[in-house]
Image (cartoon, helix red, strand yellow):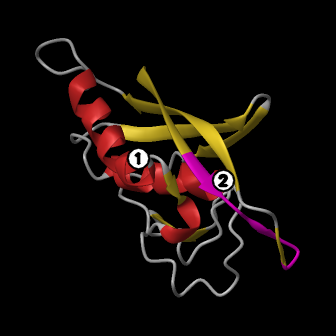
Amino acid sequence: MFELRIQRTFAAAHAIVMAGVREPMHGHNWEVTVAVCGEALDADGLLCDFHLLEGAVDETIRPFMSRCLNETPPFDRDNPTAELVAQHIANKVSAHLPVGVRVKEVRVVEAPQCEACFVVPTNVTHNFSQDRASDKTRNISSDARVLQPGVIQ
């Protein structure tokens, strides 16, 4: 198994809802680490071009930079927790990866010593569901629920 990791940072504010109570708006310098993995290297000895992975992550977090997550899709309708930010990044990045490469995990640090990690189940080889509007609980933790083979909501 081969693995690549890249790191990015973006500044954004958010106010999450916990037990029905919205916390005060506050900001973080969000540190993101995306790990991808695969069994085989290509003819050039690469799992995946770092530039492709960097571009996918940059494209995903660009809308969040210096913004309020609560006003930025999908967090204008989803609680902008670190767990859901990590899952969202995994969702988006997976769509850009070559065949045989998958997102392994996404770590999001919103404050020193406060880290959320979305670990993709090993049986998932396709993009995650990006439409969680049908999710009635709207309370997905970093332990994703597998509702159908290959689909995480």
Q: Which residue is mark 2?
A: 83
- Indicate the quadrant containing the N terminus: top left, top right, bottom left or bottom right: top left
Mark 1 Cα shell of 10 Å, populated few (<14), some (14-19), many (≥20): some
Q: Which amino acid, by three-letter code, is at mark 2?
A: Glu
Q: Is residue 78 visible?
A: yes
Name the residue rendered at 70%, 82% in the picture.
137
In-front residue for pair 3/93:
93
Q: Start and end of the magenta stretch?
A: 12-20
- Indicate the quadrant containing the C terminus: top left, top right, bottom left or bottom right: bottom right
Instruction: Look at the image and say whether residue 62 sits in the magenta stretch.
Output: no
Res 56 → quadrant: top left
Q: In the visual, does 142 lie left or right of 43?
A: right
Regarding mark 2 in the picture, which secondary structure is present there? Answer: helix
Extreme residue in the left direction: 43
- Asked if the residues shown at circle 2 and circle 1 are in contact, with their CB atoms under 8 angstroms apart, the answer is no
Upstream in sequence: badge 2 or badge 1: 1
Regarding mark 1 in the picture, which secondary structure is present there? Answer: helix
Instruction: Look at the image and say whether residue 14 sits in the magenta stretch.
Output: yes
Q: Which amino acid, by three-letter code, is at mark 1?
A: Ile
Q: In the visual, does 140 lie left or right of 53?
A: right
Name the residue rendered at 42%, 69% in the picture.
130
Res 107 → quadrant: top right
Q: In the visual, does 106 lie left or right of 144?
A: left
Name the residue rendered at 63%, 62% in the picture.
80
Res 25 → quadrant: bottom right
Mark 2 Cα shell of 10 Å, populated few (<14), some (14-19), many (≥20): many
Q: Position of residue 35 (x, y in %)?
A: 47, 31
Q: Position of residue 52 (x, y in %)?
A: 22, 32
- Disc number lying in front (2 or 1): 1
Q: Is residue 153 visible?
A: no
Q: Which residue is mark 1?
A: 61
Q: Position of residue 97 (x, y in %)?
A: 26, 42
